[in-house]
């Protein structure tokens, strides 16, 4: 017989682990606003952004503003994900995995400026796949 609901008893450290992950995600989400600000500054000053590790240089204002918006939207999504984890939403694992993947893609586009984001997002993807039970993030459909 399959369990169709989340377990009601969790290890006492699960709450602390979830809170720690949530706090880390909030900080990561706030860091995304640095990308928003940097791209707005580049657009305002008519300077180019070095993307994909310096392979591609973009100085188009609309493109830089689109990148700025992407950084802001993903940053907000990371913060919302932290809130979902904090309240123990059943979808939080899936949401975290998707948001980390999108954030990873954005970090790769903005290499080398966002190289730390590549490491952080890869780690978040690993947490989403490896540690959901420990964090109380697993839902039946996620297994």
Image (cartoon, grey):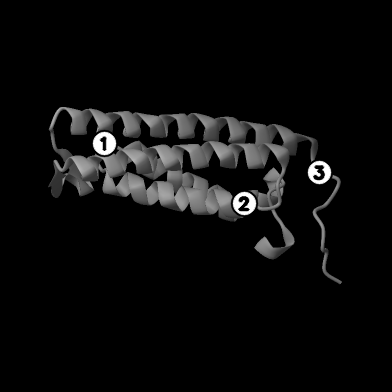
Residues at marks 2 and 3 touching, judged by CB atoms closer than 8 Å: no
User: Left or right: where does residue 102 sit relative to residue 45?
Assistant: right
Give the x, y percent position of residue 40: 26, 31
Task: Name the residue furthest front.
Answer: 62
Q: Nearer the viewer, mark 2 or mark 3?
A: 2
* Front in this rendered view, residue 136 or 99: 99
- Mark 3 neighbour class, 10 Å CA radius: few under 14, some 14 to 19, many 20 or more: few
Residue drawn at x 44%, y 48% as measured from the top left: 122
Between the C-alphas of marks 2 and 3, the distance is 16 Å
Question: How many numbered marks, from 0 up?
Answer: 3
- Residue ID for mark 2: 93
Task: Name the residue furthest bottom.
Answer: 1
Q: Is residue 143 visible?
A: no
Give the x, y percent position of residue 107: 34, 44
User: Left or right: where does residue 105 sit relative to residue 22?
Assistant: left
Give the x, y percent position of residue 19: 66, 32
Residue drawn at x 62%, y 51% as measured from the top left: 93
Between the C-alphas of marks 1 and 2, the distance is 28 Å
Residue drawn at x 47%, y 34% as measured from the top left: 29
Lower sequence index among marks 1 and 3:
3
Lower sequence index among marks 2 and 3:
3
Between the C-alphas of marks 1 and 3, the distance is 40 Å
Lower sequence index among marks 1 and 2:
2
Mark 2: secondary structure: helix
Mark 3: secondary structure: loop
- Residue ID for mark 1: 113
Q: Which mark is residue 105?
A: none
Q: Nearer the viewer, mark 1 or mark 3?
A: 1
- Residue ID for mark 3: 10
- Mark 2 neighbour class, 10 Å CA radius: few under 14, some 14 to 19, many 20 or more: many
Q: Is residue 83 visible?
A: yes
Residue 41 falls in image quadrant:
top left
């Amino acid at each position: 017989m399959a369990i169709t609901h989340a377990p009601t008893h969790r290890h006492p450290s699960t709450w602390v682990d979830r809170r720690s992950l949530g706090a880390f995600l909030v900080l990561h989400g706030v860091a995304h606003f640095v990308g928003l600000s940097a791209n707005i500054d580049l657009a305002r000053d008519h300077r180019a952004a070095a993307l994909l590790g310096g392979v591609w240089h973009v100085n188009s204002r609309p493109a830089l503003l689109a990148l700025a918006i992407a950084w802001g939207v993903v940053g907000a999504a990371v913060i919302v994900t932290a809130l979902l984890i904090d309240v123990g939403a059943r979808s939080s694992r899936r949401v975290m995995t998707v948001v980390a993947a999108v954030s990873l893609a954005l970090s790769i586009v903005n290499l080398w400026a966002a190289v730390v984001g590549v490491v952080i997002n890869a780690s978040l993807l690993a947490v989403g796949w490896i540690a959901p039970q420990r964090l109380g993030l697993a839902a039946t459909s996620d297994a």
